[in-house]
Amino acid sequence: MNWVAPIKDAETLKLFGEKLKEVDYKYYIMFEIGIGTGLQLKDILKFKVKDVRGKSEITVKIGTKNIENTFKIPKDLQKIISNFTEHRDPDSYLILGHSTNNKPVSREQAYRILRAAGHKIGLNSIGAQTMRKTFAWNYYKETGDIYYLQNLFNHASPSITYRFIGEKPNIEVFLKKMTPQENEKSRYLLYLNGNGKKRLDKIIDTLTEIRDNFDSPRNNDAFYGRVDCLLEELDSLMDNYNQTK
């Protein structure tokens, strides 16, 4: 299975959009909404014309707990949507599967189109989350605000959001943005049932096991590759932690 990654290059992003237009303009619109708002593919396919036309933001329920989150629609995207939906029935689905019936494109079909467009330009890391990850990566690069994305996507921690966009966590940002109330909460949670020491012990045990088995003849190259990646991440995290006061 290929890792689904954001499209980070502007020219590649433009070319990908052109490939979608060649299939059907509706897939280009679908993609533009995804990379412009951060909405999930499954939510975009549920929209009817009236849900998005003339709107500057859209509220949807996300996650297993159906938490409501509001996604903003940039002005340039509002114009694209307005042109696409002009003279269309407000109750028709935005991304129609067939013009003869009012049913949306299936998630499987949309996924196949996205994958096929990616293959045409040499991108194999395309999936249903590509649009959302592209939005998140661009937003993070422009603002550096990982917390906005964390809240928008209802992620449990900034670390999850960093992994989602394929960026290394910036511990310095974490620590500098911690309020006294958040620090107090962290202390409480770390002491609760000995959670802090348990987590540290788990990390120490894992690293100790790796060190003790480092010279085992049973280790293959993949083992050392994983260890090298782990140490690279730890080196970066430790540097950020030690340099932040």
Image (cartoon, grey):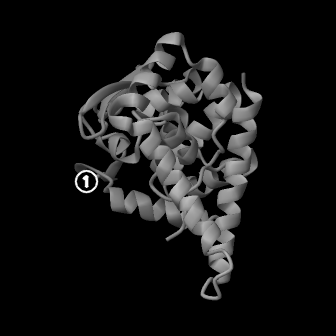
Q: Position of residue 165 (x, y in %)?
A: 58, 45
Q: Position of residue 222 (x, y in %)?
A: 63, 77
Q: Position of residue 2 (x, y in %)?
A: 54, 68
Residue situated in front as seen by the camera: 140 or 98: 140
Judge whether 88 appears above or below 20 on screen: above
Judge whether 235 appears above or below 47 on screen: below
Q: Position of residue 232 (x, y in %)?
A: 72, 55
Q: Tell me if 102 is positioned left or right of 38 in this view.
A: left
- Residue shown at 35% from the left, 30% from the top: 192
**The residue positioned farthest toward the bottom in the image shown:** 217
If the image is split into quadrants, where does the C terminus sit? top right
Q: Residues within 10 Å of mark 1 (few under 14, many from 20)?
A: few
Q: Quadrant of residue 209?
A: bottom right
- Residue shown at 56% from the left, 47% from the top: 163
Residue situated in front as seen by the camera: 185 or 144: 185
Judge whether 172 appears above or below 113 on screen: above
Q: Tell me if 203 is positioned left or right of 235 in this view.
A: left
Q: Which residue is mark 1?
A: 100
Judge whether 111 appears above or below 187 on screen: below
* Numbered circles on residues, count: 1
- Residue shown at 24% from the left, 33% from the top: 66
Residue situated in front as seen by the camera: 20 or 132: 132
Q: Is residue 31 visible?
A: no
- Residue shown at 59% from the left, 54% from the top: 5
